[in-house]
Image (tube, rainbow, N blue to C red):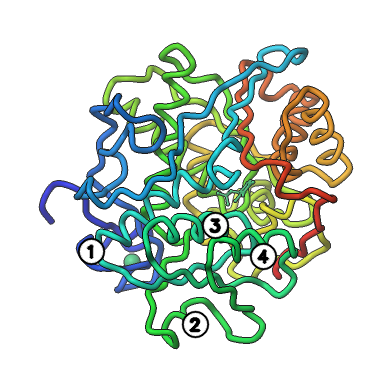
Amino acid sequence: MAAGPFLRCTRCGSEHSDREPIWHCLRCGGPLEVSGLLPGPADDRRSGVWQYPSMTGLHDARTIVSLGEQSAPIVPDPVLEGVSYHLQQLSPTGSYKDRGVSVLVSKAKEWGVRSLVEDSSGNAGASVAAYCAAAGIKATIVVPAATSAGKRAQISAFGAEIVLSRDRGTAATVAAELDATYLGHNWSPYFLAGLTTTAPEIVARSGGRAPQWIVLPVGAGTLLLGVHRGMKMLAEAGHLAELPRLLAVQAESCAPIADAWRTGAPDVPAVPVSRPVSVAEGIAVPAPVRGAEVLAAIRESNGACVTVGDAGITAATRRLALQGIFAEPTSGAALAGLQKARTRGTATGSALVVITGTGLKTLGGATPAGCGR
Ligand SMILES: *Cc1c(COP(=O)(O)O)cnc(C)c1O
Ligand SMILES: [Zn+2]
């Protein structure tokens, strides 16, 4: 296929045109990635995702759908040596998801999509609802029946329709029924491409270098993958001497990636894990779509994987709040994971903890989310 962005299947390698709406490989059903992206040049008139348009796969800047996302600040921990925080909760809808969703919805607009379907139990659904509102695209969000009232309220506020998966089946089925386009964020190669812009932003804010470790709460693992791919693009272009090591943090009660990591398996099991609940609802993902890619990225970065329990997550979230950072428990899990890794002598160098979502999402306490609902 010609140079310039095109879509490639991460499972079978087949190539697909990026001129029509498509959410997975037409040959094998695997997840797609955008190939042929470059890490520059930066557009310094903009901040955040759209400062790096060449990393997004969008062809036409006129279809950019932005709610004013900005490059996220980095602040040091006042006590813990070498630890700092990337404040991605300061985003239009309060989570890092906006960075990827801005690109996903811009591409949908470029494709001429009028009505799209997304599946999510929380932050991604709210983000898709907001960006679709800005784009004038009708959004239908398929959510598990157990989704908390607060998260449903945020999705509805943006005018999106909520459909309970218990009543109507999978999101792809709902899309077919509604004659809408299914563009789920966990499958979207454009959501992933948007997340790669995290890498140049971190490097620019860290004096042209990457921290030794980047610590992330991992559910589907798309954020981790985006960071890793972005860093690799920078390294391949000669802008970065050494890749940061990735510390992936999962909740003990729902840890398919950590479990596979421990046994050295190349992929997560096809059967979703189903175990007790966690306060870290944003990372309770029982069957991550890109599990094999996530495991390969952690390995390639010379990284590590840890799990944390709800008591540690709650304590770390409170610690963040008592220094003025209001994070949701899912983000607190990352700090809990770093502390655990350090007690084992891992991740003792400079470490950047990504704060992925705001505490405003879980006012009144997090609803423990069942893995697999
Ligand atoms: C979605 C989400 C995560 C997990 O991100 P993945 O890309 O699924 O690993 C972590 N924190 C928050 C606040 C989220 O909304
Ligand atoms: Zn394929």
Give how far apart the Cα atoms at labels 4 and 1 are: 35 Å
Q: Nearer the viewer, mark 4 or mark 1?
A: 4
Residue drawn where x is 45% and y is 11% of the image? 207
Position of residue 345 in the picture relative to residue 48 (left or right): right
Identify the residue under disc 2.
174
Give how far apart the Cα atoms at labels 4 and 3 are: 32 Å
User: In front: 230, or 48?
Assistant: 48
Residue drawn where x is 67% and y is 52% of the image? 283
Position of residue 138 in the picture relative to residue 340 (left or right): left
Give the structural element (helix, strand or loop) at label 4: helix
Q: Pointer 2 and pointer 3: residues touching (CB < 8 Å)?
A: no
Give how far apart the Cα atoms at labels 2 and 3 are: 28 Å
Identify the residue under disc 3.
267
Identify the residue under disc 1.
16
User: In front: 248, or 21?
Assistant: 21
Q: Residues within 10 Å of mark 3 (few under 14, many from 20)?
A: some
- Dot 1 amino acid type: His
The x and y percentages for residue 127 are 52, 54
Identify the residue under disc 4.
152
